[in-house]
Image (spheres, rainbow, N blue to C red):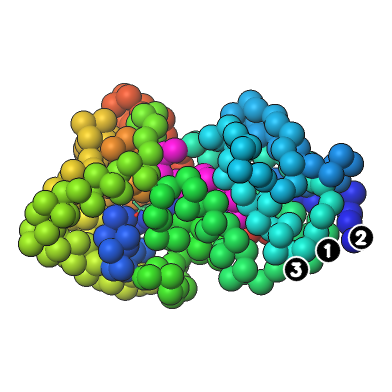
Amino acid sequence: MISMEEVTASAPGKCILTGEHSVVYGLPALAVAIDIRAKVTVKSYENGATLIHAKQFNKKVCLPLKPDRNLTIDKDLQPIYVSVVKTLEFLKIKDGVEVLIDSSLPEASGLGSSAAVSVATVKAVSEFFGIHLKESEISTLSFESEKIVHGSPSGIDNTVSVYGGGILFKRGRILKVKTSNNIPLIIGDTLKKRSTGGMVSKVRENYLKYTAIFKPILAAIGKISLQAKKFLEASDFHKLGELMNINQALLESLGVSSIELEKLVYAAREAGAYGAKLTGAGGGGCIVALAPLARCQNIASKIIEAGGKPYITRITDTGVKIE
Ligand code: MEV
């Protein structure tokens, strides 16, 4: 198999504007790709094995090309390994690769860092061997490692990371949403890590206990996403912000908000955001605030005062790409 000297691919993180958790129950969610990316470089590795070096975890391991049942793999590196193995299997390639991960996305914080790493890994490995996979193939292969990280995810994270831009996602079906990229998104990280799988299970337990109450809440969130799509397309950020605030209240009722998240949400709103809510699985992780450019710095300062770490970012149309 002919291969290049090295190939670097990158993929964006994602931010769910409306509809996390309800998307797991087959309802629509609205998400955008954000301009914070994970980069993956692939080169040849002679020993017929996979060498994974993940800078964000400060970890480096050498693993066999074919996993056997007795293999124990570091939890942080397992999804990256699965992305490599699944891609090589799909391409029917038996050569070793070295994979260097360099991600600017905070881990386990709701911004789709694991999906971005996995998507960029699939792209970099396949292009290293000169094979151009379709976007849908990259998404399907990266979803394999997402299932290992998150249990039973909806697939929204890997989808947004592959395609970029705005996406209305429902049961694996995607509708591209036209967005203005000029609107800044202010992310506030509580710096409290949490597991998406754990939060999804928590909602599931409550859902089974209070099904008659939870069903209409989830359905209302689904309706929010359909309306939010229209406001995003029309650049009506006032109304989109209002819907984000309503969504936050409903997420609170599902049991996935936290005191740290609420502090950042209120800090952003009081500093002039159109709207603010948790983004991703909740329980910790990040909030997203929508605001006019002039108010961004003030909102970022208030997020710091409230104990969080701000990122001012934008929607990006660029999904996975070769650097
Ligand atoms: C993941 O970013 C958000 C959740 O809706 C889980 C999922 O969609 O897989 C909580």
> Marks 2 and 3: CB-CB under 8 Å?
no
Marks 3 and 1, how far apart at CA: 7 Å
Assign the N terminus to one quadrant of the image: bottom right
Q: Residue at x 23, y 40 (%)?
A: 257
Q: Secondary structure at mark 1?
A: loop
Q: Residue 196: x and y, percent?
A: 37, 44
User: Can you name the residue that lies furthest to the front here?
Assistant: 70
Question: Which comes sooner in the sequence, label 2 or label 3?
Answer: 2
Q: What's the mark number on residue 130?
A: 1
Query: Which of the 4 quarters of the picture holds residue 168?
Result: bottom left
Q: Residue 210: x and y, percent?
A: 9, 54
Query: Which of the 4 quarters of the picture holds residue 173?
Result: bottom left
Amino acid type, callout 3 = His
> Marks 1 and 2: CB-CB under 8 Å?
yes
Q: Nearer the viewer, residue 301 or 13?
A: 13
Amino acid type, callout 1 = Gly
Q: Secondary structure at mark 3?
A: loop
Q: Which residue is mark 2?
A: 2
Q: Nearer the viewer, residue 163 or 228?
A: 163
Instruction: Look at the image and give the residue range highlighted in magenta.
Output: 108-119
